[in-house]
Amino acid sequence: MTSPFESSVVVVVGKRQARARGGWLNEWAEFARASPTAEVLLVHGNLTGMPDEGGNLRLVAGDEGATIPQLRLRGLQAASASRVILTEGFGRPAPGLLAGHRALEGRGPVDPASGSVMRASGGASHWALTMVEYGRLLEREPGEVQLPPLVNASFNRQALLALLEEHSAELIQPQLQATLFTAGESFRPTGSVLIDDNRLPFREACRDLYHQGRLVGGQRMKDKGLPLRLLWMLGATLVPAVLGWRIIRATAAAGLLGQLLRSFVQVKLMLLAIGVGEGMGALRGPGKSGERWS
């Protein structure tokens, strides 16, 4: 059946974002009311207390305790429009979010695209988290986006679902990147901007980054032998340096080196958390990190 909407915006709502209620989520509800040509889907494992559903705002229930990657896939499957934009509930849409993604439609089968992420305010640890998680998406001169996080990304929904494994249970960034690369697809930039307003405390941010790293490391080394897992664990010690260099380049291009220097200690510790997590995941598997990244 043909969708009445030009695009679907899938907003993955983590546990902390859902507890915030109001705030971010109300802004997405207002965005839905102001964007009648798009459906907005708020996806969470527990819909209690969420904004009221109606019109082009839909509430989509994932399984209780579902992880962020699982909720992403649930939202992708529930969307109806041919173009789907993936984001998360901590962000605020800037004007032109929809237009930037729609302008690229129809240029390839999956047609992946990625917009920018910017922070308007916050302390050193808040800026550090933005740079660590979304440094590659900071506003800068247009160019192909390498390995973008799935917080302001769009795809042809049916083509992407067809490309995923038949029994996929989640949508994880590194696995999706590998799948798209094999299919000869790459992310192109859009002019759309998402405002990162995440105010997660520093300690909790490091914990979440550790679990993200462990989940990714565990997934990458799934079913691999001990020698390869040990080798990957050793290689994970280089993760902070590799990611740090990417952050320096991205912040320099965005004119934010001064902010990076003010947040240097926090950035360094967050990168260490990712590296330790990926090494542990490679050696011992993801454990319960998926449940804690939710």
Image (tube, grey):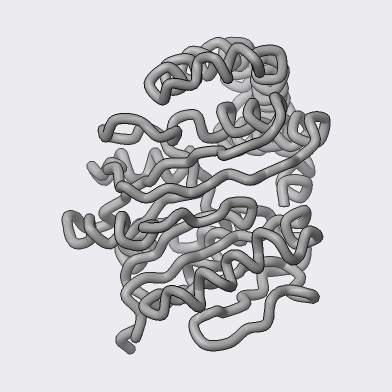
Give the quadrant of residue 23: bottom right
255 to the left or right of 132: left
Q: Position of residue 119 (x, y in %)?
A: 56, 38
Q: Is residue 95 above or below residue 271?
A: below
Residue placed at 50% from the left, 39% from the top?
118
| Residue 230 visible in the displayed image | no
* Residue 75 spot, x, y in % from top left: 53, 67
User: What residue lies at 57% left-to-right and 66% top-to-bottom?
Assistant: 28
Location of residue 284 by image quarter: top right
Which sits in the foreground, 66 or 286? 66
Give the residue drawn at x 50%, y 15%. 257
| Residue 62 visible within the image | yes
**In this picture, residue 2 sits left or right of residue 137:** left
Instruction: Provide residue 196's location: percent of width, then percent of height.
Output: 58, 44
- Is 129 placed above or below 227 here? below
Task: Return the residue nearer the eye: 267 or 32.
Answer: 32
Residue 288 percent location from the top left of the image: 79, 44
Residue drawn at point x = 48 percent, y = 71 percent: 77
Identify the image quadrant of the N terminus.
bottom left
